[in-house]
Amino acid sequence: MTYIYSEFYLYHLPSLNAFVLYLRTQPHAAFRLLKILLIRIFILAKLGIARLLHQIWWWINVESLSSSNAASVPITSELCCDSSASFAFSEMLLFSPVTPGQISFLLGIIPVVVAWIYSEILEYRKNSVSSRAGHSEINLVEVGSDVVKDEDRAVLLERGTLQSGSPKARNITASPSIIRFLLMDEYFLIENRLTLRAISEFGLLLAYFYLCDRTDFFASSKKNYNRDLFIFLYFLLIIVSAMTSFKIHHDKSPFSGKSILYLNRHQTEEWRGWMQVLFLMYHYFAASEIYNAIRLFIAAYVWMTGFGNFSYYYVRKDFSLARFAQMMWRLNFFVVFCCIVLNNSYMLYYICPMHTLFTLMVYGALGILNKYNEIGSVIAVKIIACFLVVILVWEIPGVFEWVWSPFTFFLG
């Protein structure tokens, strides 16, 4: 019925002024119409972008088959699908072919962004209705009686005071989250507005990465290393950070109850933070003269990750699958999406594979026969076993290839 009414209002009102006046006097109908228009735009945009990306994918494959050097030549994204329509990106160059993963990511992020925009509109509408209701002279106690008007009940529904009694609303609320998302359920979108915003921001950041790294949309320049500038910026950062870093923390050991004076959580996080700053500055300025120091910092960073995981599993004794999955997600989710969007190899981001591998080693070492971890000799045997595994895999010729060859498709 909403569709029929909106079509009638859109096409049969005598003039634009009358239509605008109607929307002002009937805000609920206006937002229903806006919801329908957004759904239509979302469907049309998704279909149009899918067709466009399909044409791009087909064109790139044809070009790559017709030229043996297609992978090394920048690809112009100025396309013409037929005589009546052409797709151009202002002479923007793509430095790598468009992959199915990139197309899938784009088609997946578009509905999320549309849903987030609509949820922000709904939140604004909810706040405006609540502010008007707060200044009204309606007695909310009397509104709960049987003589509630339809408009007042709609206000309370928007504020979440009442529950809708219609079977249709109850069925939508009881539906799975993915169904409510696809149906653009207003209550679901408002409840998950912050989540939709976070996913949208994440997708926009990855799109920005693609524009910077895979197109000529932004001009590129060569890295220029200046030792004086590098040291000046680093010491300037030290001075600023010293204003907040020198603070004594009194973290106590869960075993002895005494204060942990060294390698407590605050110290290790501070240490890792400074090394991360150096990693970024090293790559940004291409400071090759500190290469050896950066290798040591990376080794120290991996060691601290293992130390932190060991401390957690040894103290908390939480070897649940949920904790393990959470750790793997934290280590790899950003890298996985970067690999998909930028079409990079997983090993290009070597830090994350290293952390993942040694996290698996610590989890396996402490998880096996974990009820004996309180015995010091058992822990010593496990630590020695980890050393022997590292020596066996990396020092004996042929073992490394034999262990990792089944994962070549993923690790490269």
Image (tube, rainbow, N blue to C red):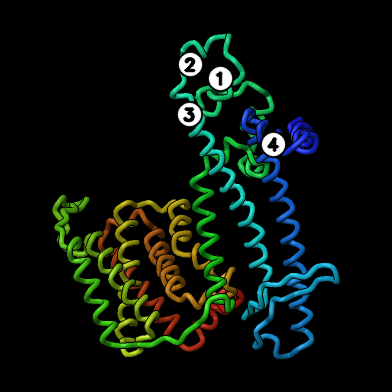
Query: Gap between marks 4 and 1, in whole Å?
Result: 27 Å
Numbered tag placed on residue 152 in the rendering: 1
Amino acid type, label 3: Ser
Q: Earlier in the sequence, mark 1 or mark 2?
A: 2
Query: Gap between marks 2 and 4, in whole Å?
Result: 32 Å
Contact, CB < 8 Å: mark 1 with mark 2? yes
- In the rendered image, residue 130, in percent from the top left (x then y), is placed at 48, 29
Residue underneath mark 2: 138
Q: Earlier in the sequence, mark 3 or mark 2?
A: 3
- In the rendered image, residue 260, in percent from the top left (x then y), is placed at 17, 58
Query: Gap between marks 3 and 4, in whole Å?
Result: 28 Å
Amino acid type, label 1: Asp
Contact, CB < 8 Å: mark 4 with mark 1? no
Q: Earlier in the sequence, mark 3 or mark 4?
A: 4
Residue underneath mark 4: 17
Amino acid type, label 4: Asn
Residue underneath mark 3: 130
Which residue is more in the foreground, 46 or 67? Answer: 46
Q: Which of marks 4 and 1 is nearer the N terminus?
A: 4
Crowd tier of the residue under label 4, counting other residues whose Cα lies within 10 Å: few below 14, some 14–19, many 20 or above? few
Q: Which residue is located at x 61 percent, y 18 percent?
A: 150
Query: Gap between marks 1 and 2, in whole Å?
Result: 9 Å
Which residue is more in the foreground, 182 or 89? Answer: 89
Q: Mark 2 falls on what kind of element?
A: loop
Q: In which quarter of the image is the C terminus?
A: bottom right
